[in-house]
Amino acid sequence: MPTDEQIAEACLDSLALLGGGYVIDDDGVLEYPGERPGAGWHIHGWLERWLWVISNGVLERRRLRKRRWFCVSTGATCHSRPPDNWGSTHFCWLLILLKLWPWLNGGAGLHNTAEVSHALDDHGCRRTLQRWLRRASSDALEIQQAIRRALIERCEPRPVEHLFPKGLSPPESLMRRRWRDPESVERLHRALVMLFAGAVELDIPTAVLLAEARGR
């Protein structure tokens, strides 16, 4: 199991600061051009919002512009979704998982959890974390399988199991607590172990590995 220091080192930058299809303008605004949805779709401006990202270990609130598209034949519109933008939340996907990790992996409980990095201390209230956990747990199996497939592709021809010589069993403290859906929480914990340990062992940014998994 990687240490907090190792995880923090592997999570110094969000995908937007590593490229990942983004363009950063002179004012630091993140622009995500995306790809045209298909024939008949035309550029229709930008959809703007704010997004918290991590840049060299420091949290920053950046303006994000996502390309909007318009279909001439139907009048429909849509926008390109960055791989690290999770629905309507104002935090990138990497930061959400970093916030959930110490709660799931530690034994102190939600109210006394120590963050992987002090940069995360003042972001994401307990109620927000509970909401994130419910939502992530509902997709836990899909998240786990996607991260595993990304690791398999990175590790070939070696078996992915060599990254986890001590296995992926959840800590006893996790299973002792009362969860609404303990099986899904266990799957989510396993997915996070694979994500963070895989990034540390393969010496790649966690945001890159996560984006590869999201692409699957």
Image: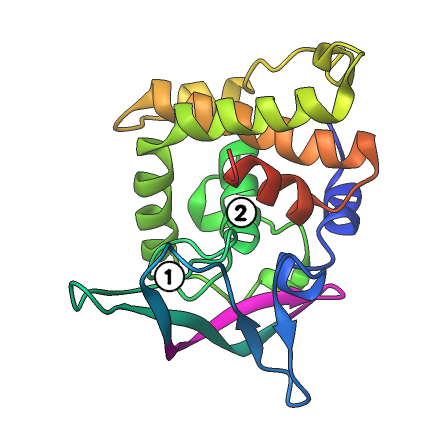
Q: Residue furthest left?
A: 74
Q: How is the image coloured?
A: rainbow
Q: Is residue 66 left or right of residue 71?
A: right
The mark lying in front, picked from 1 and 2, is 1
**SS at circle 1:** loop
Instruction: Check the image and report above or below for 126 versus 140.
Output: below
What is the three-letter code of the residue carrying label 1? Thr
Please say if 152 is above or below 131.
Answer: above
Say whether residue 58 is left or right of residue 84. Answer: right
Across and down, in percent, residue 20 comes to 64, 56
Residue 93 image point, x, y percent: 50, 52
Disc 1 to disc 2, C-alpha distance: 22 Å
* Residue 200 screen position, x and y as percent: 78, 36
Q: Is residue 155 above or below residue 100?
A: above
Quarter of the view holding residue 140: top left
Dot 1: few (<14), some (14–19), or many (≥20) neighbours within 10 Å?
some
Q: Quadrant of residue 40?
A: bottom left
Q: Which mark is residue 89?
A: 1
Mark 2 Cα within 10 Å, few/some/many (few <14, many 20+)?
A: some
Image disc number at residue 113: 2
Is residue 163 on the magenta stretch?
Answer: no
Numbered disc 2: secondary structure: loop
Question: Callout 2, which amino acid?
Answer: Thr
Numbered range of the magenta stretch: 44-59
Q: Main secondary structure of the magenta part?
A: strand
Which residue is drawn at the image coordinates 61% and 52% (left, top)? Answer: 115
User: Does the segment drawn in magenta span residue 57?
Assistant: yes
